[in-house]
Image: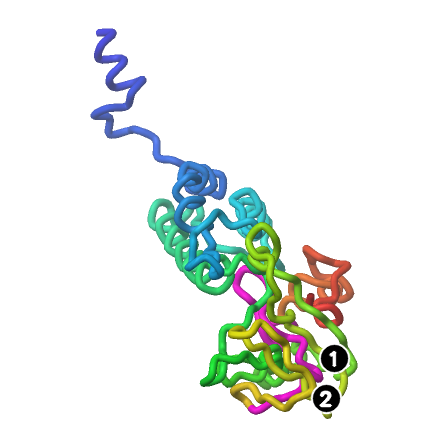
Amino acid sequence: KNFEFLVHNIFGLGSTTQSQPRYDYDHFEKWVQSKRTRIEGTVLVSQNNYVEGLPYFSQSFTFDSFISALRVTARFGVSDGLFFYVGDPVSGERGFRAGVVNLAAFLANAMVESIVYDSCDETYWESSSDGKYPMSNSCGQNSRSYQDETCPAWQSFISCPVNDAMMVEGEVPVMGKPPFFFDDQAPQFQCRAGAEYDVGYWDPSTETYVENEPFPNSSGRTDVEGCCWWGRGVLHTRGVCNFGKLNFHLGVRAANENRPSIYPDIDFCFNPK
């Protein structure tokens, strides 16, 4: 009798009435926490390009900060009715599995956009045929022009306005600091006034920055006026439309319009940094 009680009532084996977990956020986070070692060892891993791509645990993107962000976006939401989907009690196991796939897609994108470089700011990856990097890459890489990537007409009111006088300089990535790297390196992405000012290029073969020389990026820019909208964050959010959406849903604009805001004091259009 005791054996049957233990097997069926305590351990739940062979029971058709065994209660199912409540597939809410707490259940999802508990599952993610159980994968911590795997996530830290395979997902949150950067590469030191100065040492033949030697892998190391990311310093900018940690598991604890990831959980903190997930908790905010999935449990509390980022705006009116906008949540990072991780499942819900009504959808049960099916919703839970959809949440896992959603998280996998997000992290897969983050791995190639930012985690591998250990940098919250976009870095130089597009060079000329002779291996030089245009400083005007801050205006856009892969033939893109970030300051011209406005929202579609029906969302035009969301885009950030371009201020040609804005001056912003990117952050030095972890990989560009000791103990990862000690030598000279390319200047960080920047924007400043002066359409007539040629910002030049970085030559990695000689580790020199050649300034005041016209050296166009893939879209033909040689200056950095109004070019403040390069990628930032774990997904390297780019362009005036996307930064406008951040401000509209998460920043000071949401607060000013009496909508919920996670960052009510931050104007992502005024300071995309």
* Label pair 1/2, CB-CB below 8 angstroms: yes
Q: Mark 2 points at which residue?
A: 197
Residue 55 or residue 255, whichever sits in front:
55
On whether residue 238 falls in the magenta region, the answer is yes
- Asked if residue 157 shows in the view, the reply is yes
Residue at image coords 70%, 67%: 268
Q: Position of residue 76 (x, y in %)?
A: 59, 49
Say which amino acid is labelled 2: Tyr
Mark identifier at residue 192: 1
**Residue 58 at x, y percent in the picture:** 51, 50
Magenta part mainly helix, strand or loop?
loop
Which residue is pictured at 60% across the width and 70% down the height? 186
Figure quadrant of residue 80: bottom right
Image: magenta residue range: 220-243
Q: Identify the residue at image location x=77%, y=59%.
A: 265
Disc 2 secondary structure class: loop
